Image (cartoon, rainbow, N blue to C red):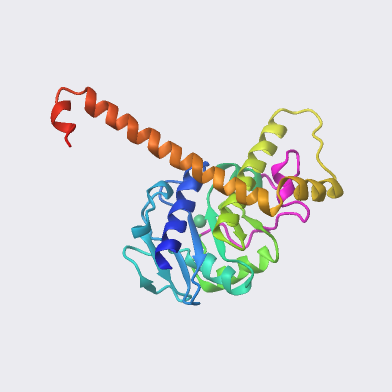
Amino acid sequence: MSDAIRDLVATSSQVLAATGHGDLIWGHASVRDPEGRGVWIKSAEWGLEEVTAERVQLVDGEGAVLEGDGKRHSEYPIHTEIMAARPDVGGVVHTHSPSAVALASTGQPLRPVSHAANYFVPPQVPSFTLTADLILTPELGRSLALTLGEARAAFLVNHGLVAVGPTLQEATVAAVLLERACAQQLLTHAAGGWPTWSPPEESLAKREHIYNDAAVSAVWDYLVRRLRAGTSAESSGIGVNIGGSSSGVSAVGP
Ligand SMILES: [Zn+2]
């Protein structure tokens, strides 16, 4: 079981990197431990795109590493405290994605100017403003969980975002959609004019038509396919280079 969970955390991390959520070595995704021991989350000091199953560890509510190697992320309480407050949540994503940080820092509420924001709005995406510093303590984690409430995502103003879901697959898609929605709104406002957006009843209809459970599942599958395609394209490129080099004969063995 833990192998499958480690693989899922690694795949989610790589998907997040591939969709513009990377911030050097910061940002993390987690899965609730099915045995109630804590959360499975990447170890610190790796970029999201570098996360492999071996770089995932099990961290408990006090920050102890129960399984796995490497340093623990100091912001583990984001994950453990949201999981504690939300029994419906099985996966949590926290990243410093650029458009979410930029939009939240303007003070503008997220508006459904494109499809993506309808996944969240209404209600308004909550904003955590108690601190823009790291969430280093269980107390801060609980405050963030309180701000999140029953929502799918929240902004950590001047810091990043959190997105949650019944599974990490759904939390990951939520994070991807939130960043896209924020980027679209920034683009809209940068263009000037007189922006329009969907009223609440249309947002709810669009949510059902566009982002129903089957569609969200298909989006996850698409993101993973795209990730795999990128990996295999890179591998075949390396192979071509080896074959074309002067030492290519020795590289092409049985
Ligand atoms: Zn952070």
Residue 214 magenta-highlighted: no
Q: Which residue is nearer to you in this view: 59 or 236?
A: 236
Relative vertical location of residue 39 with respect to residue 203 in this rendering, above or below? below
Q: Position of residue 142 (x, y in %)?
A: 59, 71
In the picture, measured across the screen, residue 208 lies left or right of residue 142, that is right
Residue 111 magenta-highlighted: yes
Q: Position of residue 211 (x, y in %)?
A: 70, 48
Q: Position of residue 67 (x, y in %)?
A: 36, 71
- Check the picture and name the quadrant holding the C terminus: top left
Is the stretch drawn in magenta largely helix, strand or loop? loop
Q: Magenta residues, as a range? A: 106-133
Res. 151 visible in picture: yes
At 32% across and 63% down in the image, what residue appears?
Answer: 70
- Check the picture and name the quadrant holding the N terminus: bottom left
User: Which of the 4 quarters of the picture holds residue 62?
Assistant: bottom left
In the picture, measured across the screen, residue 139 lies left or right of residue 120, that is left
At 50% across and 46% down in the image, what residue appears?
Answer: 224
The residue furthest front is 254
In the picture, measured across the screen, residue 12 lies left or right of residue 189, that is left
Relative vertical location of residue 129 with respect to residue 173 in this rendering, above or below? below
Number of callouts: 0
Q: Position of residue 96 (x, y in %)?
A: 53, 49
At 43% across and 72% down in the image, what residue appears?
Answer: 63
At 46% across and 77% down in the image, what residue appears?
Answer: 37
Q: Which residue is nearer to you in this view: 204 or 59?
A: 204
Res. 109 visible in picture: no
